[in-house]
Amino acid sequence: MSFKIVGIGEILWDVFPDGKKLGGAPANFAYFVKKLGLEGLIASRVGNDLPGKEILDSLVRLGLTGDYIQIDSRYPTGTVDVRVDDSGRPEYTINENTAWDFLELNDRWSKLAGEADVICFGTLAQRSLKSRRTITSFLEMSRSNTIKILDINLRQNFYSLKTIVQSLELATILKFSEEELEILRNLMGYSGEKSSIGFCRKLISRYGIKLICLTRGEGGSLLVDESSHYDHPGYRVSVIDTVGAGDAFTAAMIIKYLGSRPLEEISDSANRLGAWVCSNAGPTPVLDDKIKELFKS
């Protein structure tokens, strides 16, 4: 397979008590796409500062290109303070007014939008009007057959019903967690729809979405399309932390989706990779050969 797969939005430093690690959902997603053998690209923005330079250096070490990373002369590189609880679940404090809040649609990005086969985006990077307009324009400039993954990532208070609805209208695939399911039900007036499958089908019907993924942590996932669904129980592992697991899941899911694999295989591969990431520290662990075997065509 030869596809150009883009993650657009935030790139930042996840600052843990014992040090910092490269992060941001679109960046993590692109990393896993690249490591699984396809072309993963990051479209984001860093500050003209030492942390920004360190991000660019880190991308080189990870085998990723910084060609689509913009440099901001006014705002600093983004950071997130991360605390991991005893179960490995992270709590985030996401700092505001950082470089990725000011994404710009330049000529290089416009060209990339037209070339992309897949674009992954979320709501967090749309918390500012500037970046929201840029991301929306980027998606609208893509080809009609470009697959647009909305990995919704509702964080803190950085989302609104308006942004969610606009994003759903642009999405081909939607991914959200159990916690986000409850938020969406209440925000969108579907609190009476108690069935997860029923709720997903309402979104599919209303917004023309092709595939919805509900992730359930250690409980696996639910994949739903217009006519079928598959419920996966997940894999039990010894959890170090869950940071980046959802982004790995998304990368595995789209690679199998592009290969026109059945829901069962898509779900199994995505759950296996997500679980494996949970058993490693940080959002961008080095993939082992056993995991890579799952994605050989």
Image (cartoon, rainbow, N blue to C red):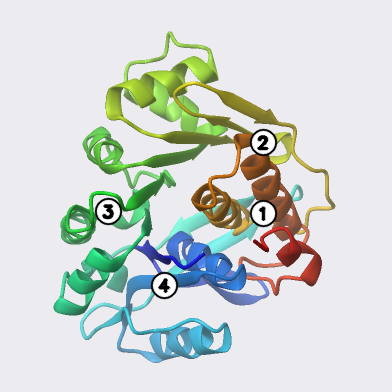
| In the foreground, 59 or 24 | 59
Q: Which residue is mark 3?
A: 126
User: From mark 4 to mark 3, how far is it between C-alphas?
Assistant: 19 Å
User: From mark 3 to mark 2, how far is it between C-alphas?
Assistant: 32 Å
The amino acid sitting under disc 2 is Glu
Specify the quadrant of the image occupied by residue 283: bottom right
Task: State the mark number for residue 242.
Answer: 1
Q: Are marks 4 and 3 in contact (CB under 8 Å)?
A: no
Specify the quadrant of the image occupied by residue 232: top right
Residue at (47, 68) in percent of width and height = 2
Taking 257 as reference, is 72 above or below it?
A: below
**Other residues around mark 4 within 10 Å, as few (<14) / some (14–19) / many (≥20):** many
Specify the quadrant of the image occupied by residue 19: bottom right
Return the x and y of residue 80 as percentages of the image width and height.
47, 65
Q: Are marks 1 and 3 in contact (CB under 8 Å)?
A: no
Dot 2 lies on which element? Answer: helix
User: Which numbered disc flags the more N-terminal residue, 2 or 1?
Assistant: 1
User: Which numbered disc flags the more N-terminal residue, 1 or 3?
Assistant: 3
Q: Say left or right for 31 vs 129.
A: right
The amino acid sitting under disc 4 is Leu
Q: Which residue is mark 2?
A: 264
Tag in front: 3 or 2: 2
**Other residues around mark 2 within 10 Å, as few (<14) / some (14–19) / many (≥20):** few
Q: Are marks 3 and 2 in contact (CB under 8 Å)?
A: no
The amino acid sitting under disc 3 is Gln
User: Which numbered disc flags the more N-terminal residue, 3 or 2?
Assistant: 3
Q: Which residue is mark 4?
A: 41
User: From mark 2 to mark 1, how far is it between C-alphas?
Assistant: 23 Å
Tag in front: 2 or 1: 2
